[in-house]
Image (cartoon, rainbow, N blue to C red):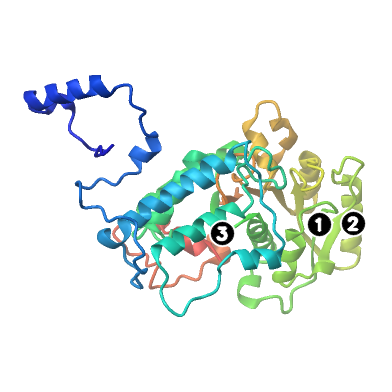
Amino acid sequence: LDVPPRAEPISKLPEELRDHLTREFVHTSSVTMPAASDILLEPPMERGEMKPRSSEECSFASVSDRQKHERFFYDAVKILLEDAVFKGTSRSNKVLEWRDPIKLMQLLDLKLEDSPVTHDKLLALMKDTIQYSVKTGHPYFVNQLFSSVDPYGLIGQWLGDALNPSVYTYEVSPVFTLMEETVLSEMRKIVGFTTGDGIFCPGGSIANGYAISCARYHKLPQVKTQGLHGLPRLVLYTSADAHYSIKKMAVLQGIGSDNVCLIKTDKRGKMDVNDLQCKINETIKEGAVPFMVSATAGTTVLGAFDPITQIADICRTHKLWLHVDAAWGGGALISKKYKHLLNGIERADSVTWNPHKLLTAPQQCSTFLTRHPDILSACHSANATYLFQKDKFYDTKYDTGDKHI
């Protein structure tokens, strides 16, 4: 069946041709029709223009050429839909065809060639990649804390990849900049912040790193220009069951793992606020400076939610930055039934929230949200003049890239 996706309505065809098509439809209505995906994946070209799938070598030029690549695009997308999306998420198929590393290396042809490969070779490699990969969208995949393949999220990913934006300045990425700002604003409202700022991050670990960076700057802003030299010993606090990224990011930023004070948890995995108060007092007696508490809303193993309201009271007393790592549990804010688990989160200075977990967005989709409107820029901006000029022909508050590390 060769039906151009943008064919004219039958009512606009000449009467003689319209009658002929009507008769043909009546006589052939019992014929088995092809799958809709087969029709929709046929390229919008005139009959005879489409190149058949060929063994043509791949082009070295990184530019899409209709004659060279259109057939390849359609064939590749069809494989993605049929093998990865539909078959890959069917209960009748396996989550994984397991092979040990040595065997898998023998099965897959991953070596770098001295000469170009063909489109057929790439398509075959795509099918092998799908066959031996974990189907994370499968109903039986319950290994990690992220969600299944959302059809609209998938198309959004493809749209972003097709346009390949760098969302640093409005002038080079106007639509995606406005998309990000709209989503981040809505997420801050859901958290309960009446003002503030936010950014998308490569993952929850980096978002937690932003929290440490902002908290340190908030306590001692001279750290941006002077570094750690001459500063007092800084200490942050988090539960013994908190995500490992808190300790890793403290190491990366020069605070040191010894200055990440792990707080005891109760039998349900929640931070013990009495132990938190004791540890803060000990730090002060040692002459060190407490600067941050990182509470967890949904720990990795037990799914525990720390008592944010009580922790916020202690932070207010000692003038500490309160961060809530809600990378996993933040999705509960959308639920009328479970949002109480995060009571008090509106009192936090910052929040990590990963929509790719409970909200089914594709990976990676991680956000860092803060109630402080200017701290991301103050803490991280370098004012590179080739990107972030202040005399542009639009409102440069939409040049958001300088807030990122």
At numbered mark 2, what does the secondary structure look like: helix, strand or loop?
helix
Q: Nearer the viewer, residue 177 or 279?
A: 177
Task: Give the distance between the C-alpha atoms of the residues marked 2 and 3, in whole angstroms.
Answer: 29 Å
Quadrant containing the C terminus is bottom right
Q: Which mark is residue 376?
A: 3
Label 2, on which residue? Answer: 279
**Residue drawn 59% across the image and 44% down it:** 355
Please tell me whether residue 249 is drawn above or below residue 93 in the rendered image: below
Q: Quadrant of residue 11?
A: top left
Percent position (x, y) of residue 314? 81, 47
Whether residue 108 can be seen here? yes
Whether residue 394 can be seen here? no
**Residue drawn 35% across the image and 43% down it:** 41
Task: Give the distance between the C-alpha atoms of the residues marked 1 and 3, in whole angstroms.
Answer: 22 Å
Earlier sequence position, callout 2 versus callout 3 = 2
Earlier sequence position, callout 1 versus callout 3 = 1
At numbered mark 1, what does the secondary structure look like: helix, strand or loop?
strand
Percent position (x, y) of residue 234? 78, 67
Label 1, on which residue? Answer: 237
Amino acid residing under circle 2: Lys
**Callout 2–callout 1 Cβ contact below 8 Å:** yes
